[in-house]
Amino acid sequence: MRSIVVGTDGSETAERAVRQAGDLAKATGASLHIVSAHGGAVPADVTSALLEKSAGSLHVRGIDCECHARQGDPAEAILTVADEESADVIVVGNKGMHGSRRFLLGSVPDKISHHAPCSVLIIRTT
């Protein structure tokens, strides 16, 4: 494994996925890429700040990462970075993947699992 991509929106459940991705990167020696999307109600400076917070929590544990702030749809942002970085795996949390609403709303984990250019590891975060 050479490259891991994980997305975050700064929520506690997303940060659980970031921690797990960090553990996987540390165990395998893979590079870690954290992605967050901005636009609409989320300004770019807020996205940058939450990426810095996520990266900081990993650096404290001795895990290096690269941050990617992207404009637009979160799932698209994660998939694009996965393509750009030739990711071996995308790590996502399971939040939003339960109940019949997922079929109507289309959650980020669902979109990623259906369109990923690589394997997807779904972390139980709820």
Image: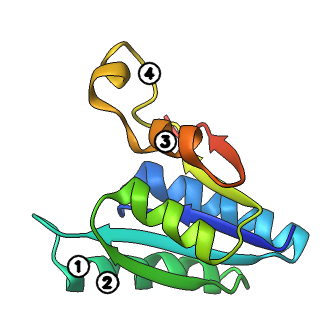
* Direction left: furthest residue: 41
Crowding around mark 1 (Cα neighbors within 10 Å: few <14, some 14 to 19, many 20+) is some
Examine the rendering and report whether any part of residue 21 can be seen: yes
The residue positioned 45% from the left and 48% from the top of the image is 13
Which one is earlier in the sequence, the residue at label 4 or at label 1? Answer: 1
The residue positioned 38% from the left and 80% from the top of the image is 69
Q: CA distance from mark 4 to mark 3?
A: 11 Å
Screen quadrant of the N terminus: bottom right
Q: In the rendered image, which residue does mark 4 sit on?
A: 98
Q: Are marks 2 and 1 in contact (CB under 8 Å)?
A: yes
Amino acid at the residue labelled 3? Pro
Q: In the rendered image, which residue does mark 3 sit on?
A: 109
Q: CA distance from mark 2 to mark 1?
A: 5 Å
Q: Could you say whether the residue bearing mark 1 is in a helix, strand or loop? A: helix
Which label sits on residue 49? 2
Which one is earlier in the sequence, the residue at label 1 or at label 3? Answer: 1
The residue positioned 48% from the left and 75% from the top of the image is 54
Q: CA distance from mark 2 to mark 4?
A: 29 Å
Q: Could you say whether the residue bearing mark 3 is in a helix, strand or loop? A: helix
Residue 100, percent from left and from top = 36, 13
